[in-house]
Image: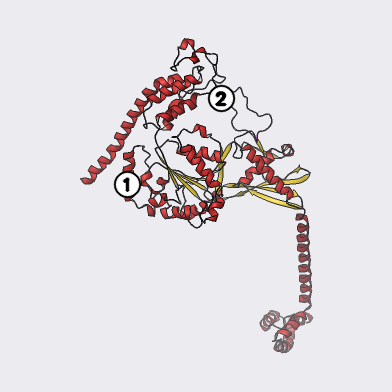
Amino acid sequence: MDMAQQVFSLLNNNAPIAQSVMNCLNGTPELANATATMLPQMGATTSNFPKDLPSLITFFFSISALREWLKILVFGSCLESLRRLSLHLYYKIYNSFFITARFEEDDICYDWLCLWLSQQKTWKQARDVQVSNRTFGLDSDATMIEGEEDDPTSIVHGGRQLAYMPAANTVQTMWWKGTWIRTIRTQREGHYGRREDILELCILSRSHTVLNEILIAAKKTHREAQQNMISVYVSDSNNSWRHIASRPKRPLTSIILDPGLKDLLVDDARDFLASKKWYATRGIPFRRGYLLYGAPGSGKTSIIHSLAGELGLDVYVVSLSRSGLDDSALNELIADLPEKCIALMEDIDAAFSQTLNRDADESDDEDDAKKDKKQDPRHGSSTSKITLSGLLNALDGVAAQEGRILFATTNKYNSLDPALCRPGRMDIHIEFKLASKLQARDLFRCFYVPDSQVDVDNKDTSDTKTDSGYSSDSNDEKVHSKHTPISFNGETHHHTTKLSVKQIEALADQFAEAIPERECSMASLQGFLMGYKIRPRQAVLEATTWVEKERAAALAKKAKVVDVPQASVVATSS
């Protein structure tokens, strides 16, 4: 009886539940009588259930179990808040003594820090490192491990050199100028499943002075290691610039062009870089564009490489044929260029033509130009997502980057749209022709004259006489090279003959006489001389035969190219 009263007192606000309990308890007469007695009381209590909010709140708080749960809830919330507050204060105080810097792999600063860490004595004594053969964009001894120097007497060197790198997901500690530094290199999954590295530096210091010193030291170390190098950047699938390599600077003296071309480019580029204030005062966009056109292999790309080294600028290669590149991505790339750099667009005509013809013959270029005109370049081709209007906006639109030097190369000058070639986009147009006799002579001298430009055989009395450049083989004094190079046909070269500067000059004149005017490219001449790099006399003797072979090959190629369009025309007319 007492149990039934307790159940009904707890469930007095719910008549259906009470009725269910009553039905369950109807099994015994005693319980049935008790239920009949309690039903009027339950009905009275149900009718007195609070109907307004204050009464409802008072009613719930009158339940002792609910009051206890509320006390626990409030106490737990306060405890969790105190825990979070204490952790927040702890990390805030802790971080006030540390400075954390993160460097992503696709940024040049990452290479700076990795190169700098690889040279630290403390880091070389670390217990947990990752050994890598990466040179961090450099081809120098800067990252070389002690004892791994190449043998100078060996013809074949040891290839890539080893360097220390922070072990992935492992904390390393070091001291630098009395400052404690913690490093950790983590890896994450990037776009298209590519793994990306992040280098984190945690410095025990309350000011940014130590971090600034580390960054300056790392940048200086990288610059010193790259003193004779130029950096090359390309765009990746994320439309960001990625450093891919560093190439040795090429001296301007090694570029053989028509007289005045090198001076024109170098002087104009230097004047532009020093005229930022002049451009700003007159409201002229601080940009400069050069269009280099002409025969293939005439030195267009080579002069750009050499000019970048002369001016100390990095090269950013803009590939208009890259997969996934459209007008929006091109604008983003151009806008992301640094202020002082060289942006290179090679074969710019290929971005708006379905067929790419590299024939050096002018008639072939004219035929290709006519075919290209039948296509509407303003809408782009089916093989390229870049449109002419998008390219023009990227070059001199509102979002176009200022301070950069743009170089564009093409073998088909007549196929370019006039809007692309106008001043403001391409300010200077320079034609590169096939090799002249003067260029052939200078190239020969560049190959065989000693670096010191001093006669290596001052005791030779024949130098005082008129020398044709040839002498009897029996009277030649042999010079044994330290390394015996291998020729292009797999045979070892003969020992070279010691020649004076005057003899080389005479041979260069005879070589120039054997080369026809404006028929051979500089690249083909260089390839020919590479086969005789220590045999200048043999190169002169076989120059005429080589020219005849080149002419025959050019005629055969021209006949083959001309026959194809004629056959297609006959088929169309029928």
Residue lying at the far left of the rendered structure: 574
Give the percent coordinates (x, y) of residue 92.
Answer: 76, 58
Q: Which residues are magenta?
A: 139-151
Report, in whole angstroms, how far the alpha carbon at label 2 lies from the one at label 1: 52 Å
Position of residue 546 in the picture relative to residue 216 (left or right): left
Position of residue 118 in the picture relative to residue 483 (left or right): right
Q: Which residue is mark 2?
A: 452
* Foreground tag (2 vs 1): 2
> Which residue is more in the foreground, 464 or 102?
464
Query: Quarter of the image holding residue 13?
Result: bottom right
> Which residue is more in the foreground, 439 or 246?
439
Give the percent coordinates (x, y) of residue 148.
Answer: 66, 29
Q: Which residue is mark 1?
A: 371
Query: Quarter of the image holding residue 6?
Result: bottom right
Q: Look at the picture and state if 536 lies above or below 61.
A: above
**Secondary structure under the numbered disc 1 in the rendered image:** helix
Q: How is the image coloured?
A: secondary structure
Q: Residues within 10 Å of mark 2 (few under 14, many from 20)?
A: few
Q: Residue at x 47, y 14 (%)?
A: 465
Q: What amino acid type should be assigned to the residue bearing mark 2? A: Ser
Are the residues at dot 2 and dot 1 in contact (C-beta closer than 8 Å)? no
